[in-house]
Image (spheres, grey):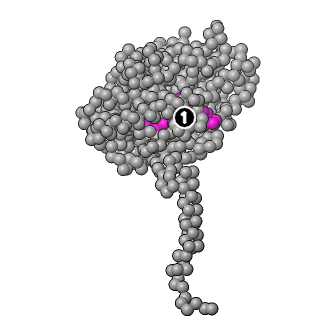
Amino acid sequence: MRARNRPPVARIVWSAYSLALVLALAATVGVVHARDLHRTYCSAGLLTADRDTELRPAPGGGTECVGIATGDVRFGSHLKGGSDSEGGRLRELEKLVHAENAKVLRENPRAYVTVVYAGPLSSATVDPSLVKGAEELAGVYLAQRVVNENYRVKLRVLLANGGADMGHQRFTADAIVRYADRDPTVVGVVGFGRDLQSSPAVTRRLQEAGLPVVSGTNSATYLPKDFSNWISLAAPDEHQAQALGLVAQQLRGNGEAPHALVLARDTKASQDRYTSEQAYYGGEMLREKGFRLLPSRTYQVANGKPELRLHAESICRGEDVPSVIYFAGRVEDIGPLMTQLGVEPGCASREISILTGDDLSKAKFSGVGGRDGVAPRITLYHAALAELREAASGTAFYQDASQHLPWLGPGEATYDSPGFASGQTALSHDATRALYWAASLGDVRQSRAATWVNLRVVKLEGMATGTIDFTDAPLFGERHGHSIVLARVRRTPQGLSQAEVLCSRPAGVSKPLDVKQCSIK
């Protein structure tokens, strides 16, 4: 029988079956959306996510958490590579920094400035080391503790991860800028310590946002010339090559010009710019010193390993074997190079000198724990960025470190101890103190724009690397007075690799080194 009354449309649409279908579709969409959020962001819920950090592809596979940690994100909780001790140290430092930040917000909500540290706070399977990021972060935290215990304007530190070898630093810079737009207490950035192809774009992005950058270890020659918001404590690549020229001049002698060679890491398939800058200035220096330059060579890196065997065979078995090699590579490549040169007949029986830049200051030779070494008849001369020995007697840095870094035992905070010898901790500490000083001039909280201007009046004595003096730093020009060290590494009769300081100059001294100071005899 036909129903007397036709059911209304609403009753049909909102029947139990229709409602179940709608709920199922909504649940499916929610699950898909939540899964997408969890795949994209480091911290996500069902419908929302912390968009200041993202999961990005890591070298060698997997993902890494990059961006700026503004909420509950901890980069240490996302680590997959790195040794247990390095990962544990990073997690401990994150915890210490966040505890100090909470204290600042709780006790001094109206009298603090915020500095962002941007560094490599994750690792990759092809190079699992976290040493640089952990050592730099230790220096930043140490500066934060010293400042907050001794000054009225307090220091809050936010952590930003540029990824392994700073491979995602462009995204990280964008994240910093977006956060700074909504937080006026952010006065500048410390870090960005690796010179990459993206470094100009990153620096320009921060400059457009009005953010000054004080880097501890980025030795790019061009950045302070191209950007007025950039200041670095690192001696530029050009200055390093000039200093190494004092050694090359002595190796050249007064007789017939010896052969020399520039061996550089191939950067066409990578973001690295440091090695190409080193190769250029190193080659120019050798030419100026009168060496007969052989055609330069570039080596590939595959799966994190340098391909040097064919280059070593060609160099050592050629008609003209170089007596000096300028190595424009990374610290992780020096071991394979030494192994290859040490067994090739044309090189193993010759005295060869290798000159190289500051990346080798991260090596660990016998005097600082072992791991790296030199071949029997090869002498390695490398630049380093932090003169620590001469500056040690005039700084409270090591006393402060013993007091505030909980993993240090009595007598373990010295300029030549494993955690300090590379200079990474000292340089990041000094960079943070310098930026804070500009942001709190007169013990009054300064604006972001004022901090940028005030950097040119910063002069701090008694820092870990000497006197940090920016008063002679011109806009769009290079400054002088960087800390610099020339070190020599050679084999001992006992078969160990021994590192020694050949000559050095602490920060704040503008007088250049000379041949007499850097005598190799």
Along the line of sight, which residue is nearer the eye, 76 or 383? 76
Which residue is found at the position 59% from the left and 44% from the top? 63
Magenta segment includes 130: yes
**Residue reaching furthest front?**
1
Which residue is found at the position 69% from the left and 29% from the top? 308
Along the line of sight, which residue is nearer the eye, 191 or 408? 408
Which residue is found at the position 51% from the left and 20% from the top? 418
Q: Which residue is mark 1?
A: 274
Q: Amino acid at mark 1?
A: Tyr
Q: Looking at the image, how many numbered discs can be counted on the residues?
A: 1
x and y percentages locating residue 414 in the rendered image? 45, 16
**Residue reaching furthest top?**
493
Q: Could you say whether the residue bearing mark 1 is in a helix, strand or loop?
A: helix
Magenta segment includes 429: no
x and y percentages locating residue 99 in the rendered image? 39, 35
Which residue is found at the position 66% from the left and 14% from the top? 377
x and y percentages locating residue 312 in the rendered image? 71, 26
x and y percentages locating residue 110 in the rendered image? 27, 41
Q: Splitting the image into 4 quarters, where does residue 379 fall?
A: top right
Q: Splitting the image into 4 quarters, where does residue 370 fall?
A: top right
Q: Quadrant of the N terminus?
A: bottom right
Left/right of residue 168 with respect to residue 109 in the rendered view: right
Magenta segment: 117-133
Q: Quadrant of the C terminus?
A: top right
Left/right of residue 495 with respect to residue 471 in the rendered view: right
- Name the dominant secondary structure of the magenta segment: loop
Q: Splitting the image into 4 quarters, where does residue 276 fall?
A: top right
Residue 201 is at least partly visible in this image: no
Residue 1 is at least partly visible in this image: yes
From the viewer's perspective, is residue 143 above or below residue 65?
above
Along the line of sight, which residue is nearer the eye, 469 or 347? 469
Q: Residues within 10 Å of mark 1 (few under 14, many from 20)?
A: many
